[in-house]
Amino acid sequence: MSTASVYLAGATASGKSALAMRLAKRLGGEIISVDSMQVYRGLDIGTAKPSAADQGEVRHYLIDVAGLDEPFDVAQFVCLAKRAEEEVRSRGARPIFCGGTGLYFRALFDGLGESPPGDESLRAELEAAPLESLLDELAARDPAAFESVDRQNRRRVVRAVEVIRLTGRTYSSQRTGWAGPSQAPENLFCVTHDPGDLAKRIHSRVDAMFERGLIAETERLAKRGLRDNRPARQALGYRQALEHLDGGPGVAETVELVKSRTRQFAKRQRTWFRNQMDCQLLEWPTGKAEEACCERLLGMLG
């Protein structure tokens, strides 16, 4: 049996995790998470982290590998992901990479370039500036980065403008030294849905997260340092739940806000995978269960 790695990418709520579980059972595989937020212990509901039962049934990697008081970045991901891939293969199992963090996928395939280190004084200046002025500068100096960056994520906007000011060059052209689409492996698949179908899936997921206790989970995490972890506190769902806990919008409005922000995020993910990755598109027919999509994927794998 082949042990060639399989890569499942796609937007949030596209069903790729359920598909990876089925594929792992069919192929004798183990799953390596490609998700920048599932690495944090405690961020469970809001990241749709695989359940303990799923992790007991199929071995997972790169989940719960960092505490809220620990930094975690793409370089650490690449190192741990390659180590996990070797471990999976050493047991004769098939590595199945699954997630929606496009930057992590690209770094895994094409390596990491040399972006400039942060500058403390400049960073302080940018963090004190209004977000709107930073976005205006980014749009004027690097339209490509403006289109692809999460414009609600202040940390990412600050970093993009910081790099531009430090180097005098666009952030999009140099942050990793990449040129053109990724030299992606053959077995890279991007799960796609009809936009209306994906929106329904997003709404259903968000409703389920709040029903399961996302606000209570966020409150517990806030006591453990969530607000001090800049990447984690910006995660979809947690960011809005923190705003609610801090006297912001009510629960109903917060739920709708998370739905809206998640739809926007999914659109940016689709744009990233379309423009940055040479994926094989795996269309998930509306109304079909993951078993039908798994059969289609197995056929594409040959």
Image (cartoon, grey):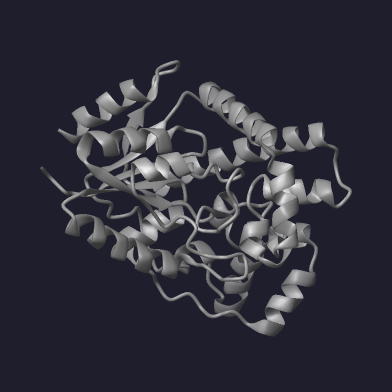
Write down the quadrant of residue 157 in the picture. bottom right
Where's the C terminus, which quadrant? top left
How many numbered circles does the render carry? 0
Q: Residue at x 54, y 39 (%)?
A: 266
**Residue that extends furthest to the left in the rendered view of this protein:** 1
| Residue 220 relative to residue 193: left or right | right
Above or below residue 168? Residue 17 is: above
Query: Residue 86 in the image: x percent, y percent?
Result: 23, 62
**Foreground residue among 123 and 145:** 123
View extreme (right): residue: 247
Q: Residue furthest top?
A: 287
Viewer-proximal residue, 275 or 228? 228
Residue 114 location (% of width, % of height): 43, 76
Q: Position of residue 261 (x, y in %)?
A: 66, 40
Q: Quadrant of the N terminus?
A: top left
The quadrant where residue 284 appears: top left
Q: Position of residue 4 (x, y in %)?
A: 18, 49
Q: Residue at x 42, y 38 (%)?
A: 17
Front-most of residues 37 and 263: 37
Question: 2 or 191: which is nearer to us?
Answer: 2
Q: Residue at x 55, y 38 (%)?
A: 267
Residue at x 42% of width, y 57% of height: 62
State left or right for residue 98 relative to residue 124: left
